[in-house]
Structures are given as C-alpha cells and as structure tokens.
Amino acid sequence: MKHPQLRYSLRQLRYFVATAETLSFTGAAKELHISQPSISTALAELEACFDIQLFIRHHASGLSLTQAGYEMLGKARALLKNAEELQSAARDIDSGISGNIELGCMTSLAPPLLPRLLSRFMRTHTGITFHTHEASQDELLAGLYDGTLDLALTYNIDLTDVVEFQPLLTLPPYVILPKRHPLTHNRTVSLASLQGAPYVMLDLPHSRDYFSRLFDPLGEPPTPIFRSSQPEVVRGLVANGLGYSILNFPLKSTRTVDGAEFAVRRFSDKVAAITLGIAQAAGMKPRRAVHYFAKFCQEYIQSQYGQR
C-alpha cells in the first residue's frame, strides 16, 4: 500500500511549537539557537503546506495564535512526543519503556498523592521521567487541550467533551475538626451542627464552590473566617483550633507539619461525593509510557484508597 508523502518535517513542527510558546520569532530563535529568518521561513512553509494561517503577525507587538494555530498546537506537541518516544524505543529497545510524561495534578491532591505514587512507579520504571504540574482545574483542562499535559489526576468537576475521564474513586466529603472540639465526641457530624461555627475554607476554584453547595439544603452557605489555597495551611489552622474545614481526599495522617493534630468525622447527612480519576485529551492516543503510567495509577490508587 502506497502512503502519501509528508510535506512537512519534525523540524518545522519544533519551530512552530517554540514560536507558539514564546509568541515571538526572536524568542523562538534564541530558544532553539538558530537564526530568526530560519524560523520565519520554516513557518511560512508550514502554513503553505497546511494551507492555514497559524499566526497573526503584529507589527509592534509580536505574534498571536489563530484559532487554527491553537488547535494545531496540541496535535503538534503530541506528534513530537511520539517521535521522541520512537527514538527512545530504538535506543533502549532492550531496557523497557522510556520517555517523559507531563503530569498534571489538582493542587489539593498533589501533597497527599503524588510523592508516594511517583516513588512506587519509578521503582520499576526507571526509564520514565516526569515533569509535574500542580494547578487548578481550569489550568489542567487547558493543558490537556493544548497538549502541554499528557494526563492529569483530578476530579470530575466541570469537565468538557474535549476531555476523556477515567473514574477511579468516589470520594465523599468529610469534616476536619480541632482535636478537642465538642463535635469529636460524635461518630458523625451533621451539616446543621456546623452552622455558625468558624469555617476555614480551602480557597481553590471549583473546590470552594463544591464545599459551599453542600450546605444548600440549609439555605445558607458557611462564611469563612480564614481562607487558604494550600491544603496544609487549612489543616494547620484547623488543628490549631481556629475552626473546622471540609475535605474529601483520604489522609494517611491527622498530624500537621507543626505537630498539631486534627480529627476526622464523616457527615451524617446525605452529601454529594465527587470522583477522582485520570483526565486525558479526548481522541488522543496515549504514548506507551503514558498508557503504562495511567494503568499503574488505576491499580495503585484503588488499592491504597479504595473503600474497604
């Protein structure tokens, strides 16, 4: 079977990605250590090959991506990663799977999940390296769409049809309280019993809205007296007696970095759970290294944190 001849090169795609990331011919030329005219010529040839305009040239303020350019960027990054994996496979054919994975993780999930997960994986997959990106849900979805990320560990919050989501765990929310709080005498805590109590908010996009909506049946969301985007700070404020908070990822320890302790209690109310899973760009066939890591994530997370 005769295959059509490609009219573009990996070199042109590298120039395109570098220029898209810097939005400057000069910046891309410096990053790639080549001349600016070489960049300009290669991209003009690439646009002619695809018969689309990738950039809008602004005389005084550099470049901006067209919508077509933005859509091509993720595909170009994916193709370059596959090319790198092919080269690695040829070089290390007898040494197992290799390559780099751009891994995104929800900010609140990263501290309790990523270190142990990556450590376990890399014990048996020494040829795979990682660049980790801890970010908000919006940033993770944007990274999957434009090809910056290979996959992301996150929740099923505000997902769109450009993302494929593999559910791993259903995680009901729970309340954390100061160790000597009166409510710790109860096995479970009601939402009503928390009304008017000092609230420490995990102040992350989507997370703060999700926790506030738990109180919708009572008609009044909690008013935070402290806010933090850092989960460890939230836990520390609670452990030091400044209020309660609500989380949903299971923790291995109830002691904070300053040595204080907090207590964990489930809700007696029927509360909406969220789902932890693996998000990837829809329709994008994962590279071999990404496929093996996603499979490991599924097995590890479900064995470590699955309901018993």
Image (cartoon, grey):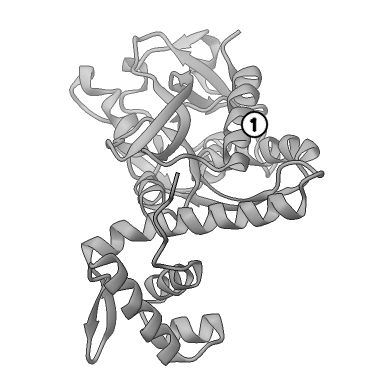
- Find the residue positioned furthest to the front: 1
> What is the three-letter code of the residue carrying label 1?
Glu
Seen at 37% across and 82% down, the residue is: 24
User: In this view of the protein, which residue sits in the foreground, 305 or 207?
Assistant: 305
Seen at 18% across and 22% down, the residue is: 219
User: In this view of the protein, which residue sits in the foreground, 222 or 248?
Assistant: 248
From the top left corner, tell me how far across and down residue 142 is, in percent.
35, 51
**Which quadrant: the C terminus?**
top right
From the top left corner, tell me how far across and down residue 96 is, in percent.
76, 41
Residue 158 visible: yes
Dot 1: element = loop
User: In this view of the protein, which residue sits in the foreground, 269 or 263?
Assistant: 269
| Residue 13 lies in quadrant | bottom left
| Residue 271 lies in quadrant | top left
Q: Residues within 10 Å of mark 1 (few under 14, many from 20)?
A: many
Seen at 52% across and 35% down, the residue is: 238
From the top left corner, tell me how far across and down residue 207 is, in percent.
37, 37
Q: Is residue 275 above or below residue 104?
A: above
Badge 1 is on which residue?
261
